[in-house]
Image: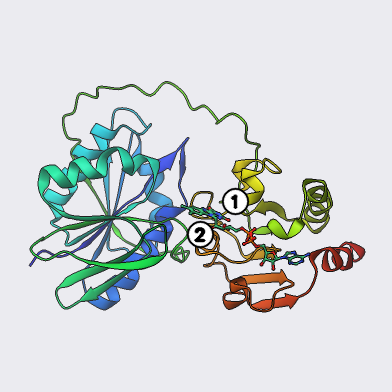
Amino acid sequence: MMAGILVVVEHRKGELRPVGRELVGLATALKTASGEPVQVAVIAADPARYAEPLKLAGVDEIVTVQSADDAFDPEVYEASVRALIGARQPSLVLLPHSVDTLGYAAPLVVRDGHGFTTDVFAVERDGEGWVATRSGYGQKVNVEMEFPGHATVVLTVRPGSFKPVEAAGAPAISSLPAPHVTPRSQHLAFEEPAGGDDVDIPGADFILSIGRGVGEEDNVEQFKALSDSVGATLGCSRPIADSGWLPKSRQVGQSGKTAANCKLYVAMGISGSVQHMAGMKHVDTIVAVNTDPEASIFTIAKYGIVGDIFDIGKELQNHF
Ligand code: FAD
């Protein structure tokens, strides 16, 4: 039987992306269930500099692959992950569900015949195999996927779904020779999308989000002021972004951003649709304010206030 859980981390502009530690969190939990070792791979021009912060508890080996350019290239990643799978023969490969893996995961698994599914938010061991859970039908149902007949299963995992590992460990460090690839594209520069603002929803640790309960555009300003006063980053549900009341970059949820590093999420006038909760239900402390005691948001809130967001907003503002 093949053995091993291989995590491939990502980096951008010289920084490891936080999702890497989340995948290590998932991999180390699965190691307990399966007894399979955890390998973490980093593909970079100078992989040693990324290897240091990846010396995490539960990781057995860090495998580095040197690439000519530090920026992401789909062909380099496809060839490198192919080489990693060939060398370590993992039963499970965990990749972030990201714009990068959109570029290389599908060609890799199709060419090499691996089991595959995307945007996974739960993984379990079932006997000798793996079972991955993803959503179907616009997040209305959860679908459990099995991969009979595949020795290696590749999954792209939704950011923000697993707790990142923080504790340090002492894994072995090894390297694989860079596969020979002639890239067909060249990375020129990063360009920020137009029309957004500088807000960093995935990086924020305290988010105050507003939903359709704000009623009208003129009311948004007072919640902006409130979030500034309490030191929160202002987020929103999709109707607020769709109406143009706040930029799309502040939308939390399935088709928006994931509150990946959030510790405190205050949802004001948000009903708690599955699509909104997809971006924040993992947060440890969720406070919900809603006039409707039956609102779904209360099913995941640690603290629920049945009340009017304008009254509660004023109360809060008075304390700052
Ligand atoms: P509503 O559902 O209308 O809820 C408003 C809430 O405010 C109600 O619960 C009401 O009781 C409460 N309220 C009203 N007045 C007050 C008051 N004065 N004080 C307190 N409470 C009050 N949505 C997202 O948010 N993010 C996404 O990324 C996203 N992606 C989607 C992707 C797809 C493919 C689809 C189909 C939908 C998506 N949606 C997304 C939309 C989602 O289905 C919901 O329509 C949306 O989340 C509802 O936003 P809301 O909670 O602000 O509004």
Instruction: Residue 19: give x, y in percent of width and height.
Output: 43, 54
Residue 275 has which mark?
A: 2
Counting other residues with Cα less than 10 Å from the Cα at mark 2, is it few (<14), some (14-19), or many (20 or more)? some
Q: Are marks 1 and 2 in contact (CB under 8 Å)?
A: yes
Identified at 36% across, 40% down, the residue is: 100
Of the numbered discs 1 and 2, the one sitting upstream in the chain is: 1
- Give residue 37's quadrant in the image: bottom left
Above or below — where is 99 with respect to 122? above
Helix, strand or loop at label 1? It is helix
Q: Quadrant of the C terminus?
A: bottom right
Instruction: Residue 96: give x, y in percent of width and height.
Output: 36, 51
Q: What residue would you read off at disc 1?
A: 238
- Type of amino acid at the residue the image marks with label 2: Gln
Above or below — where is 46 with respect to 208? above
- Give residue 209's quadrant in the image: bottom right
Q: In the orientation shown, which residue stands out farthest toward the right? A: 318
Identified at 74% across, 76% down, the residue is: 305
Ligand 1 picture quarter? bottom right
Instruction: Residue 220: give x, y in percent of width and height.
Output: 78, 49
